[in-house]
Amino acid sequence: LQIGRLTRVGVMETVLRAAPHKELPRTPVPLPAPAELVERAEERIAELRAAWHAAGHAEAVESMRRYTAARYGELIAALLDDADKPFAVADLIARGLPARHERLFTLLAPFLERQGVWRAEDDRWRLCAPAAPGSLLLTEFVGRHPAFVSTAALTARQLQALDDSCRDGADAAQAAISEPVARMLEQYYDVSPLCRFHNRVAQALVEQMTAVWPADRALRVLEIGAGTGGTTA
């Protein structure tokens, strides 16, 4: 107590727990098999999936894919001398694409083909006519799916960083970990519908774990690779 006002006092209790003896076998983890945990949470996960589709989020993901593919197509076209001629990834590197991105574009090849950005011609690629400019697709995407604004902002920023690295040699890797991008990542992992869905699935599974966990046994949770702490929250 202080004169004239109350002061809230926090109370901390320390509980000492002995480590198990090394010569004794460890007690089994009192949890069902993973398949049983999934089965226990099946109803809740089905609700989350139904809510995802009812909100139009599946359509939003497809729209984001179209925008991403269009921006890659624009980047490729800007690197080529003649966008009408077939090319290989090695040609893009010769025109300014950093060599470290060769594997990225090799992995992207099937996705870009499915999205109609380019088509295969023997062992080379040929760009297809773009359906719409990336800027228009981004505007339409944000207008129709405002819940994904953090996803759109982060995607646009990272694609621009890659574009800058191809044009003037800027360090895209350094841009990817800059302070503004770090803040965008925190928002993405916190409010993006993509992350919220998966975090809620994780929450449903943890709920089932705690439901069968012995009341007299400490429960400790360790998140591996807790970058922004989205899953921890």
Image (tube, rainbow, N blue to C red):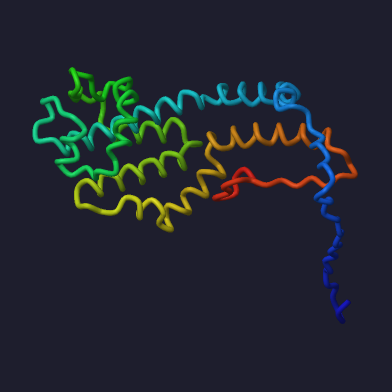
State the residue lying farthest toward the bottom: 3
Is residue 111 depicted above or below 1 in this figure? above
Q: Specify whether 20 is left or right of 145.
A: right
Q: Specify whether 143 is left or right of 56.
A: left
The count of marks equals 0
In the rendered image, residue 124, in percent from the top left (x then y), is placed at 18, 24
Q: Specify whether 228 is left or right of 91.
A: right
Indicate the quadrant where residue 143 lies. Answer: top left
Q: Nearer the viewer, residue 139 or 173?
A: 173
In the rendered image, residue 91, in percent from the top left (x then y), is placed at 15, 35
In the rendered image, residue 219, in percent from the top left (x then y), is placed at 79, 45
Indicate the quadrant where residue 96 lies. Answer: top left
Q: Residue placed at 26% from the left, 44% from the top?
A: 163
Q: Nearer the viewer, residue 48 or 214?
A: 214
Q: Nearer the viewer, residue 160 or 229?
A: 229
State the residue lying farthest toward the front: 23
Q: Residue placed at 31% from the left, 50% from the top?
A: 172
Q: Residue placed at 29% from the left, 22% from the top?
A: 113
Whether residue 205 is visible, yes or no, is yes
Q: Nearer the viewer, residue 71 or 5?
A: 71
Q: Specify whether 166 is left or right of 158.
A: left
For the N terminus, the image quarter is bottom right
Is residue 126 depicted above or below 169 in this figure? above
Q: Residue placed at 14% from the left, 25% from the top?
A: 86
In the rendered image, residue 79, in percent from the top left (x then y), is placed at 16, 39
Is residue 14 depicted above or below 149 in this figure? below
Indicate the quadrant where residue 6 lies. Answer: bottom right
Whether residue 233 is visible, yes or no, is no
